[in-house]
Image (cartoon, helix red, strand yellow):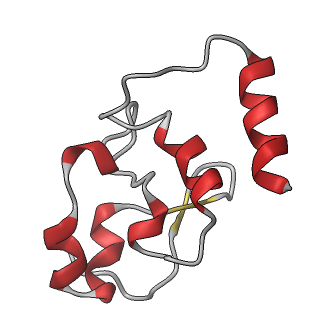
Amino acid sequence: MIAHGIFPALNKRGKKVVIRSRIRRWGETVLQTMVPSDYALLSQNRIVNLRKLFPYIPEKFNNILLHFSLGTEVFYETVDELQQDLCDALQ
């Protein structure tokens, strides 16, 4: 399926979601760099490693997203851990 635009799809709540079918716009070069660990743990057609698509995303923020990927080995044990990482990423 080829995307009709470069914008992410919208989920049921109207939030933007980057899905595999939408990244064809970026080209086959980007698709070839995708590995299973770039996709979301719960919805495996959604991409959480957004730095592959948008290199200007800060690495700290992308690392937070990668905690929710198929390839993660480290999970957030508490909301406090997630909050601390978010605070660090915003500085």
- Residue at 47% x, 63% y: name it: 50
Left or right of 76 in this view: 53: left
- Tell me the quarter of the picture where residue 6 sits: bottom left
- Tell me the quarter of the picture where residue 58 sits: bottom right
- Residue at 37% x, 30% y: name it: 72
Left or right of 74 in this view: 3: left
Left or right of 88 in this view: 58: left
Q: Is residue 50 above or below residue 54?
A: above
- Residue at 20% x, 72% y: name it: 31
Q: Where is residue 81 shown, x and y percent of the image? A: 73, 22
Q: Is residue 52 above or below residue 43?
A: below
Q: Where is residue 45 shown, x and y percent of the image? A: 31, 50
Q: Looking at the picture, tell me which residue is in the foreground, 15 or 70.
A: 70
* Picture quarter with the N terminus: bottom left
Q: Where is residue 64 shown, x and y percent of the image? A: 59, 42
Q: Where is residue 80 shown, x and y percent of the image? A: 80, 19
Q: Is residue 17 above or below residue 66?
A: below
- Residue at 47% x, 42% y: name it: 66
Q: Looking at the picture, tell me which residue is in the foreground, 18 or 9.
A: 18
Left or right of 61 in this view: 37: left
* Picture quarter with the C terminus: bottom right
